[in-house]
Image (spheres, rainbow, N blue to C red):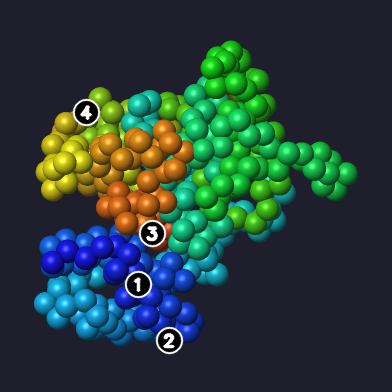
């Protein structure tokens, strides 16, 4: 027998977490719930430090089999929440720029069309869903897509006085703060700016904006390696970078250049991992099938050669594209396998940032001679 999602959630709402005294539904602890023929699968989203995880898992199985059927199989995956109170700083405490921000994460790609903005948006939402305070900066000045992906096209940030100075107030949606040049231009208009104008806008979005306190400040960089990238590392101490790529050879060559840029002398921003997007195609009507359109495990193999972790593999599925176009990113769908993939990605990114902060000195702003080449 196959049970409805509502039936299963109703049963699970009777299970309480002994540590908080709240039920699992009010704690938003049930993720990626699916019901198959005589089988129920879901992820249990609780902090690592919760000592009752195992007993809660047993309670879930017991109540499902008692209320629905003793024959139903229950598969529970544990996805620990990010402990925000334990998030350490990846930058020095005395920074004048973004003083309330603990970690700045650059999301980059060597080339366009690999889904970097889609990854940035869903990663930011997934971090926020895990309890972190998150900001998202759309630094892709010439191709801003974040307003559409987050369903805030047409909105415009407000301005307020702060210490006698006018500052921008970011738009808030889906639990994250965000800012994009897309809020200030019409979607159909082409932005024809020289490099200096683009970098000036980015500096204003960083220095003249009230971002408040954030655990993670995610920056969606434009593709390639250019003025905006140098502006970002000069304007603020970037804690770490991740590189997004598809598995195909052409994209991998550009991903390699992206790593080289961050590792270049005088920049030296730690690259904590790769994210492989469009890893395989799965049709909606054949959810168990995988078709490796862009090649299989290309970025995984590059990651192994470079000894850089592969943080996640995201499939090419229609739902991810549709959710982005509709302004409701797939990471918001707690019952989808794609949403679960981004939750897992967020957990891996958070762990690698913590590992980086425990082993390396805090990042400092990069000082670069504007007339010199960085060798990327």
Q: Picture coordinates of residue 134 (x, y %)?
A: 55, 52
Report which residue position mark 2 lands on. 18
Labels 4, 3: front one: 3
> Mark 1 and mark 4: span between their CA atoms?
48 Å
Name the foreground residue: 37 vs 205.
Answer: 37
Q: Residue at x 38, y 75 (%)?
A: 13
The tag earlier along the polypeptide, 4 or 3, is 4
Mark 2 to mark 1 CA distance (whole Å)? 19 Å
Secondary structure found at label 2 = loop
In percent of the image, x 33 and y 81: which residue is there?
56
Provide residue 217's location: percent of width, then percent of height: 55, 48
Precedes in sequence: disc 3 or disc 1: 1
Q: Quadrant of residue 303?
A: top left
Where residue 357 appears, x then y in whole percent? Answer: 49, 60
Q: CA distance from mark 2 to mark 4?
A: 50 Å
Residue that carries the numbered disc 4 in the rendered image: 249
The span from disc 4 to disc 3 (Cα, nearest Å) is 28 Å
Q: Earlier in the sequence, mark 2 or mark 4?
A: 2
Horizontal relation, residue 112 to residue 87: left or right: left
SS label for mark 1: helix
The answer to whether residue 157 of the structure is visible from this angle is yes
Q: Dividing the image into 4 quarters, which one contains the N terminus? A: bottom left
Q: Which residue is mark 3?
A: 347
Q: Residue at x 38, y 40 (%)?
A: 323
Image mark for residue 10? 1
Residues packed near mark 2 inside 10 Å, few (<14), some (14 to 19) or many (20 plus) = some
Image mark for residue 124: none
Q: Could you tell me if the residues under marks 3 and 2 are in contact, i.e. CB atoms within 8 Å?
A: no
Instruction: Please provide percent x and percent y for residue 43.
Output: 30, 66
Query: Of circles 2 and 1, which is in front?
Result: 1
Q: Secondary structure at mark 3?
A: helix
């Amino acid at each position: 027998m196959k049970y409805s999602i509502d039936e299963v959630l109703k049963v699970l709402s009777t299970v309480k977490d002994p540590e908080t005294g709240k039920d699992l539904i009010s704690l938003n602890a049930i993720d990626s719930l699916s019901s198959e023929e005589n089988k129920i699968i879901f992820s249990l989203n609780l902090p690592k430090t919760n000592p009752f995880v195992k007993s809660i898992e047993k309670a879930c199985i017991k109540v499902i089999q008692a209320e629905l059927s003793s024959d139903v199989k229950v598969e529970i995956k544990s996805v620990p929440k990010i402990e925000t109170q334990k998030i350490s700083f990846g930058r020095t405490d005395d920074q004048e720029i973004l003083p309330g921000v603990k970690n700045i994460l650059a999301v980059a790609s060597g080339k366009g069309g690999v889904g970097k903005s889609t990854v940035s948006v869903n990663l930011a939402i997934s971090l926020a869903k895990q309890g972190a305070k998150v900001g998202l900066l759309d630094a892709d000045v010439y191709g801003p897509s974040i307003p559409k992906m987050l369903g805030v096209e047409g909105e415009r940030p407000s301005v307020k006085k702060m210490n006698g100075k006018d500052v921008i107030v970011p738009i808030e949606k889906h639990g994250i703060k965000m800012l994009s040049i897309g809020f200030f231009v019409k979607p159909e208009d082409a932005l024809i700016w020289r490099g200096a104008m683009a970098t000036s806008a980015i500096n204003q979005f960083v220095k003249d904006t009230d971002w408040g306190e954030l655990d993670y400040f995610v920056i969606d960089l434009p593709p390639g390696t250019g003025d905006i990238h140098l502006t970002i590392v000069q304007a603020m101490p970037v804690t770490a970078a991740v590189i997004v790529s598809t598995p195909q050879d052409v994209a991998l060559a550009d991903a390699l250049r992206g790593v080289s840029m961050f590792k270049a002398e005088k920049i030296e921003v730690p690259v904590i991992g790769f994210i492989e997007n469009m890893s395989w195609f799965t049709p909606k009507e054949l959810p168990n099938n995988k078709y490796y359109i862009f090649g299989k495990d290309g970025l995984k193999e590059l990651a192994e050669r470079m000894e850089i972790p592969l943080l996640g593999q995201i499939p090419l599925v229609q739902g991810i594209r549709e959710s982005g176009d509709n302004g409701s990113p797939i990471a918001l769908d707690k019952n989808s396998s794609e949403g679960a993939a981004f939750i897992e990605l967020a957990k891996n990114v958070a762990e690698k940032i913590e590992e980086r902060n425990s082993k390396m000195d805090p990042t400092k702003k990069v000082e670069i001679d504007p007339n010199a080449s960085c060798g990327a």
